[in-house]
Amino acid sequence: MELETRNTAIPDDIMERWQRVVDALSKLLSVPCVMINRIHPPDLEIFRSNRDSGNPFPAGTLMPMAGVYCEAAAKRKKKVQVSDARKEPAWSDSPTVKAGIVAYLGYPLLWPDGQIFGTLCAVDTRENKWGKKYDSLFHAFKDTLEAHLMLVDTLDQLEKKNRDLEHALNEVKTLRGLLPICSSCKKVRDDRGYWEQIEVYISQHSEAKFSHGICPDCGKKLFPDIKLK
C-alpha cells in the first residue's frame, strides 16, 4: 500500500513542544529512545528525538523505512508492539533488529483527513513487555500531537484561502462613482478629461470584454430590406 503524505511545514513553536514530549517520555519510561518520526516515502525522518547522549537515533536522521517497525505502524494506521523481535519470525530479520533494536512500541500520527504524518514510538535494545502505563501515556500524547496537527492543518488551509482571496481581489476592477456620458454619441469622459467609446472605457476599468453585434431595432434602421434574427 502506497502511503499518502504531505509536506506541510510544522511551526517552530510546535516542534519545541514535541521535543519536550519525547524528552519527558524517555525519562518517564526509562527507554533509550523516544521519537516522533515523519514519513517521506521511501524514507523515514527522525523528526524529534530525546536529547540524551545514549540515544542511537538523533533528530534529523533520515533512513529507509522499508522493513522497519514504523513502516508497519504507518501502513496499518494501528499500534505496533514488539516485545522481543528476536523471538518473532515476522521481525527477526528486520533491519532494526540487525541494528540492535529488539523492542518497539509505536502509534501512527494522522492528519485530520486521515493521511499519515508519521509515528510516535519508543524503542529498546533489550526485551520490553510494554505494560499498561506505556499504553496510557502514549495514547495521551498521541492525542496531543494530533491536536497540534489539526491546528497546523487549520492554519495552512486559512493561509491558502487568504492567498486565494488576495489573488481574487487583485484581479477585480470595479467601476464606482458618477460616470459622465454624452447624451448624443454615448462617449464617456475619463478622469483626464478625454472622451472615449463606452466599451473602451469599461474594458479598461473592469474585467468585461465586448463582442459586437446589431440589435433588432438598429437592424431595422440600418438594413430595412434584410430580416435579421
Image: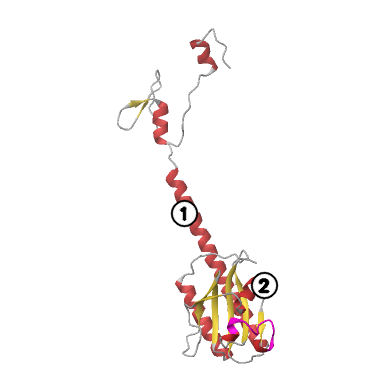
Count neighbours of disc 1 (C-alpha within 10 A) and say few if under 14, some if 14 to 19, many if 20 or more: few
From the image, tell me which residue sits under label 2.
Answer: 76
Question: At numbered mark 2, what does the secondary structure look like: helix, strand or loop?
Answer: helix
Question: In terms of depth relative to the viewer, which is nearer, 90 or 116?
Answer: 90
Residue 132 on the magenta span: no
Question: In terms of depth relative to the viewer, which is nearer, 221 or 103?
Answer: 103
| Residue under the point 45% across and 37% down | 207
In this picture, which residue range is highlighted in magenta?
87-96
Query: What amino acid is found at the position of numbered circle 2 in the picture?
Result: Arg
- In the image, which is nearer the foreground, mark 2 or mark 1? 2
Q: Position of residue 126 (x, y in %)?
A: 61, 92
Q: Position of residue 151 (x, y in %)?
A: 54, 67
Q: Is residue 169 left or right of residue 41?
A: left
Query: What amino acid is found at the position of numbered circle 1 in the picture?
Result: Arg
| Residue under the point 45% across and 42% down | 172
Question: In terms of depth relative to the viewer, which is nearer, 34 or 146?
Answer: 34
Colour pattern: secondary structure
